[in-house]
Amino acid sequence: MKKQEIIERFISYITIDTESDPNSDTTPSSEKQWDLARKLHQELIDMGMSDVTIDENAYIMATLPSNVEHETPTIGFISHFDSTPDFTGKDVKPQIIEKYDGGDIPLKGSDLVLSPEYFDDLKQYKGQTIITTDGTTLLAADDKAGITEIMTAMKHMLDNPEIKHGAIKVGFTPDEEIGRGAHKFDVEKFGADWAYTMDGSQIGELEYENFNAAGAVVTFYGKIVHPGYAKGKMINSMYVAQEFIDSLPRMETPEHTEEYQGFFHLHNMKGAVEKSELQYIIRDHNKKHFEARKEVMQNLVNTLNEQYDREAVSIEIKDQYFNMREKVEPVMHIVDVAEQAMKDLGITPLIKPIRGGTDGSQLSYMGLPCPNIFAGGHNFHGPYEYVPVESMIKATEVIVRIAELVAEKK
Ligand SMILES: [Zn+2]
């Protein structure tokens, strides 16, 4: 895999601003995502992919036809071309550090320093080529690294027909960062038996478990009376809200949990005497525990209403996404083949549960089982984002190796 080709391709993508916009209802949520979408569409055509399409919502699909006689499963590789609205992706000016010496990397457009003292993952990339930001933007390796790897892998297989593979589908989506990447993904048109999102972080990551997720809005209704004459009459909704907060387990919060531990996360509150509101997210890998968490909240609301003998509290709970494990476990060979591909390439697979969600979790429930594979970047969504080029090369090789392994199995 040619290193220079990967670097150039990656830079040509990250220098196009594709920040998505959570306040927009359109798809893509920002007009500028079309700039990269059109470029990718044209590149897929130019490199010789088949059935290259882009729909009215900027979803891009393409096919690399099978080059073997026998029947094989059709597999897909997916990434997203938007970047997060958490930090600007306009005018990305990447720094390329060759033969990284293991020390501090000044981000030269700012006072920031990317230091292994703080970001100790950096240490494992000593001697490699690292691409960083200049400190004024994010890098958008999330997920333009994934797009670079898929593009390069397809080009590599087209240029080297002696590599045997079945039909491979490619999908590029808008708006993943605002949770909508899978929403308008046409699974039937895509036509793959299963797929992988190339959207993980460090080299070796392979993920097929994520949170079950819901959001809850709890509203508290008080009674406002002149404070000088309020005895026995006023109900301060903020105190009721406080009771609610205190009744949930204090240690089951993001800052006290890890690995398979779920949580309630209070992420917003606003209050006045008359009315207060708490916004929570609920997360748990285990479906039963997830349901139990929602019940705990509902029961708490009922209890408070009984206690105050009026409708003092109401709650609205909405499911957001579910753990893909339920959909992947019955077809575990799709994880096994990815694991095998990594081992064949000398990469140590890091299989661990995601403490979040991916487009793949939604796609898995839409009928396309879809584990997540590393794309190589670190420190997503901010100016410290970086990616080692060697990890992008390895991810590209993983794509090719999976394609080979799937075609070998008859
Ligand atoms: Zn991503």
Image (cartoon, rainbow, N blue to C red):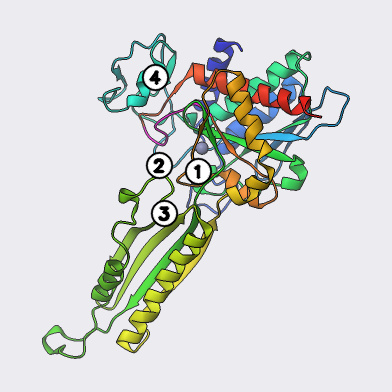
Q: Which label's residue is closer to the chain start, 2 or 1?
A: 2
Which residue bears the numbered disc 1?
A: 177
Crowd rating for badge 1 (residues with CA inside 10 Å; few <14, some 14–19, many 20+): many
Pointers 4 and 1 in contact (C-beta within 8 Å): no
The kind of residue tagged 1 is: Glu
Q: Which residues are magenta?
A: 375-382
Q: Disc 2, disc 1: CB below 8 Å?
A: yes
Q: Which residue is mark 4?
A: 124
Which of the pair 102/341 is nearer the observer? 341
Q: Nearer the viewer, residue 410 or 276?
A: 410
Does the beta carbon of the residue at mark 1 sit less than 8 Å from ligand 1? yes
**How busy is the neighbourhood of tag 4: few (under 14 within 10 Å), some, or many (20 plus)?**
few
The picture places residue 104, in percent across and down from the top left corner, at 28, 18
Q: Quadrant of residue 372?
A: top right
Dot in front, 3 or 1: 3
Up-down: is 221 above or below 249? below
Q: Give the CA separation, mark 4 to mark 1.
A: 28 Å
Which tag, 4 or 1, sits closer to the chain's start?
4
Whichever of callouts 2 and 3 sits on the residue coming sooner in the sequence is 2
Q: Position of residue 185 (x, y in %)?
A: 67, 46
Q: Does the Cβ of the disc 3 residue fall within 8 Å of ligand 1? A: no
Location of residue 373 (image quadrant): top right
Q: Dot 3 corresponds to which residue?
A: 262
Asked which secondary structure carries label 3, the reply is loop
Q: Residue 377 colored magenta? A: yes
Mark 4 or mark 2, earlier in chain: 2
